Amino acid sequence: MDALNKLTEYFREFPGIGPRQARRFAYFLLTKSPSFADELARLVVEIKKSMRVCDSCFRFYAGKSGTVCNICSNTERNHSELMIVARDVDLETIEKSGTYNGMYFVLGGTVPILEKSPETRVRSRELLKRVDGKTDKNHLKEIILSLSATPEGEHTEEIIRALLKPIAEKNSIKITVLGRGLSTGAELEYSDADTIKNALKNRA
């Protein structure tokens, strides 16, 4: 396989990128200067070296020291609320809306409807450990399931709710979902601030 085809295959690994778009990306790079390609390659290497995974919420963050991100270490945030999102981009969307001041947990994806081993597709063990630890230390009162209103998102929501139900009932923790400010089929990543605000306000 030559370099062009191999690069195309790599672009196809990106979420939401089909074979035609991947091919366009590869040809686009051919039109750019060598310095553009060099800088792109440098940034890819740098981001892998400079970004860390938070030990608490599992989001990526830039940092050279410490084990938790600036959100999890912020004592001014509401530690009694824990919002569960699928991916980092969903967390960023919520943060940009400016309507939520609690804590987060990033699942790392969603569970396909026909998946036989859902626990392998998301951070289920880490989530249980996080929730169990917060019930004693920080008096967790509410868990907000903030997943996209898509078939996979709703399926993941059902799995996570069932996973957390025993510990939530034992510790009187309320489990809520975003209200239907989000329309069916909507990706959380692409929702605007007003939609997020209404979804949070009308969660149930």
Image (cartoon, helix red, strand yellow):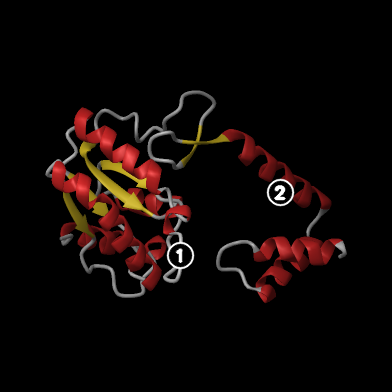
Measuring from the top left, give residue 165's x and y in whole percent.
21, 52
Residue at the image point whose x is 67% and y is 45% from the top? 44
Check the image and name the residue furthest to the top.
Answer: 65
Viewer-closest of 204 and 21:
204
Residue to which mark 2 is pinned: 40
The N terminus sits in image quarter: bottom right
Residue at the image point whose x is 21% and y is 49% from the top? 166
Residue at the image point whose x is 67% and y is 43% from the top? 43
Above or below, 115 relative to 128: below
Q: Which mark is residue 176?
A: none
Residue to which mark 1 is pinned: 116
Measuring from the top left, give residue 123's x and y in whole percent.
42, 48
Above or below, 122 relative to 42: below
- Picture quadrant of residue 32: bottom right
In three-dimensional space, the C-alpha distance between marks 1 and 2, rounded to whole angstroms, equals 38 Å
Amino acid type indicated by mark 2: Leu
Check the image and name the residue furthest to the right.
Answer: 2
Viewer-closest of 146 and 36:
146
Q: Give the number of callouts.
A: 2
Residue at the image point whose x is 32% and y is 50% from the top? 84
What kind of element bears circle 1? Answer: loop
- Mark before the other along the chain sequence, 1 or 2: 2
